[in-house]
Image (cartoon, helix red, strand yellow):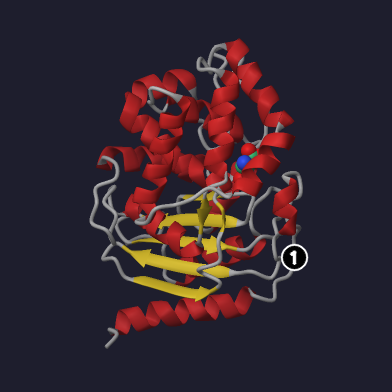
Amino acid sequence: GRTGASELIADALAAVHEAFRDLDEGTVATYIPELATADRSLFGVALAGVTGSIYTAGDADAPFTIQSLSKPFVFALALMDRGLAEVLEHVGAEPSGEGFNSIRLDPATGRPPNPMVNAGAIVTTSLVRGASEEERFARILDLLGAFAGRPLDVDGRVYVSESETGDRNRAIAYLMHSAGSLTADVEATLDTYFRQCSVLVTARDLAVMSATLANGGVNPVSGERVVDEIVTEWVLAVMATSGMYDYAGEWLLRAGLPAKSGVSGGLVSVGVGQFGLGLFSPPLDARGNSVRSVAAAQEISRQFDLHLMHRP
Ligand code: GLN
């Protein structure tokens, strides 16, 4: 039977799902045409504990493309491959205060502000080791699968849709190549980045992926060590300061947890040493964060006193 604690968590997720399922605000992203076909009523909530228990409510098994939620995990892979010092030569660790698709680079160094916005994530992707672009992407797909605890696939339609319409990311990448922060082949790097953003996941996957970060790099379901513990500390620190784009400060104020959002409507949030939370609902607010996911995650944080600044 379920313990008292697990019953409490299951009931809380169900209640939060119930409370926000009718919050029908925001707009589904359309700048990647294929994303515009998403069902705006979908809403999934999942929590994975560091003990490996998983709780879900709503559409926790509905597949969607990972988009920007790939960024913290690929940042982790770049850190494993290159170390912190080399990564920081190419990308900064400062919140940008700007949107996810900002073109601003540091005038002195040519570096993008951080790995959680598109510019920084494109550089991060270029830092993943691989003898060929195919091998580089295969390593990224394997890594995302190791975080999720199951093999993952690419949504070919979303990949083609973003690749065909990705002029802004292309422009950013060429700008960074000219500024010296992106040193790899531009088109090959963009292709890998677009593929990485098109990997299919569910809210349940996101919960396990973020629980792996919460658990010091060991997947609590599969038992596999995915990344070094120090790497999870670096990734979570950057998620805390920059994971929610130009809402990062207010997010930390209200939820008090490291988090990352994506334009398909996903959100991950992490209670270090405790749990990973994965949420999904396509309609976005003006800053590109999922309306229902943000509301639900903040409510869960409040209910369980999870704020980082909460006095233990
Ligand atoms: N693939 C998307 C892009 O590059 C990711 C952006 C996002 O999820 N915020 O525009």
Q: Which of 90 and 258 is in front in this view?
A: 90
Q: In which quarter of the image is ligand 1?
A: top right
SS at mark 1 in the image = loop
Classify 200 as above or below 70.
below
Quadrant assignment for the N terminus: bottom left
Residue under circle 1?
A: 25
Classify 70 as above or below 14.
above
Residue 102 occupies quadrant: top right
Classify 175 as above or below 191.
above
Mark 1 and ligand 1: say if the CB distance to the nearest ligand atom is below 8 Å: no
Horizontal arrangement in the rendering, residue 155 relative to residue 85 (left or right): right
- Say which amino acid is labelled 1: Glu
Quadrant assignment for the C terminus: bottom left
Give coordinates of residue 124: x percent, y percent: 48, 29
Q: Nearer the viewer, residue 306 or 177?
A: 177
Give coordinates of residue 306: x percent, y percent: 41, 63
The residue at the far bottom in this view is 1
Horizontal arrangement in the rendering, residue 287 relative to residue 185 (left or right): right
How many discs mark residues in the rendered view? 1
Residue found at x 70% / y 43%: 161
Give coordinates of residue 169: x percent, y percent: 66, 30
Residue 20 occupies quadrant: bottom right
Note whether residue 92 is visible. no
Residue found at x 47% / y 44%: 239
Mark 1 packing: few (<14 Cα in 10 Å), some, or many (20+)?
Answer: few
Q: Which of 91 and 196 is in front in this view?
A: 196
